[in-house]
Amino acid sequence: MLRLIVLLLLLANGGYFAWSQGYLLPWGVGPLQQAEPQRLAQQIKPEAIRVLKADDLKRAETAAAQTPRPPECLATAALDDSAVTSLRPVLDTWPAGSWSFEPLVEPARWIIYMGKYAGVEQVARKRAELRQLGISFEAPANPELEPGLSLGGFTSEAAANQQLQALADGGVHTARVVQERPEQRGQRLVLAAVDDNLRPRLDELKAPLNARPLKACR
């Protein structure tokens, strides 16, 4: 009996060795062959890793912080005449050519709206239901529609109604189409090249902009 067990162990070890070395591949038996050279190129090279001392790390962080950020173009949404009038005295102290006003027409915006809700708990329940349905949402941009949810914005009422029907087919039955904002005409402030010299001065614009955000130019 003992001899039989020893023989079986030897056969098992021999079979595993032949399998692991790929000797059985001609018969369709063997380990999965990894033949993807791109994996080697993606490997982290341990010889390139260097442990920095505290002083070296501090110098590296300082050098990174001192690297100038590239200039960026920032702009506002449409501003009315009173906002433009408030901004001009501040902007007149900025370098010539660093700012400009451009006429802007923002089309009316329609949203698929759910609300108003009684409170934040009801909003949270509705958010959870929408997540289960795989439907994205956001807070409406119009404060008068809070607390509520927007399921998408559109430049025409017809497009919004078309999407509302698609959402209804997917299980959303309490949403409706509302106009989030009417067409807006005015001027937008454009800061064409905000560099490290001008970035600290952006705080000067917060009060006259009255919380209107500056966003990347489109």
Image (spheres, rainbow, N blue to C red):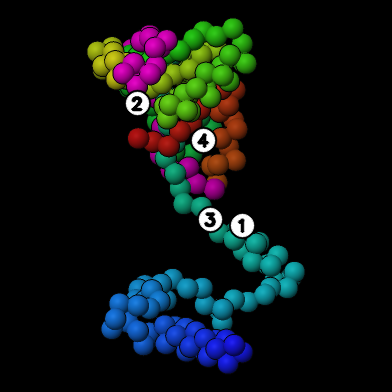
Q: Which residue is rendered at x = 59% and y = 7% of the image?
A: 118
* Quarter of the rendering containing residue 107: top left
Q: Write down the residue under mark 4.
A: 94
| Residue that mark 2 sits on | 102
Check the image and name the residue furthest to the front: 1
Snapshot quadrant of residue 167: top left
**Label 4 amino acid?**
Trp
Which residue type does callout 3 highlight?
Pro
Q: Can you say whether 198 is above or below 89 in the image?
A: below
Query: Are discs 2 and 3 less than 8 Å apart at CB?
Result: no
60 in relation to 182, above or below: below
Q: Which residue is mark 3?
A: 68
Q: Where the N terminus falls, by quadrant?
A: bottom right
Q: Nearer the viewer, mark 2 or mark 3?
A: 3
Circles 1 and 2: CB atoms closer than 8 Å? no
Instruction: State the extent of the magenta-drawn residues as a range.
Output: 167-196
Name the front one of labels 3 and 4: 3
Q: Secondary structure at mark 4?
A: loop
In space, the residues marked 2 and 3 are separated at their CA atoms by: 28 Å
Identify residue type, mark 1: Ala
Q: Earlier in the sequence, mark 1 or mark 2?
A: 1
> Which amino acid type is shown beneath numbered disc 2?
Glu
Q: Measure how far apart labels 4 and 1 are at the Cα level.
A: 25 Å
Disc 4 and disc 1 in contact, CB within 8 angstroms: no
Of badges 2 and 4, nearer the viewer stands 2
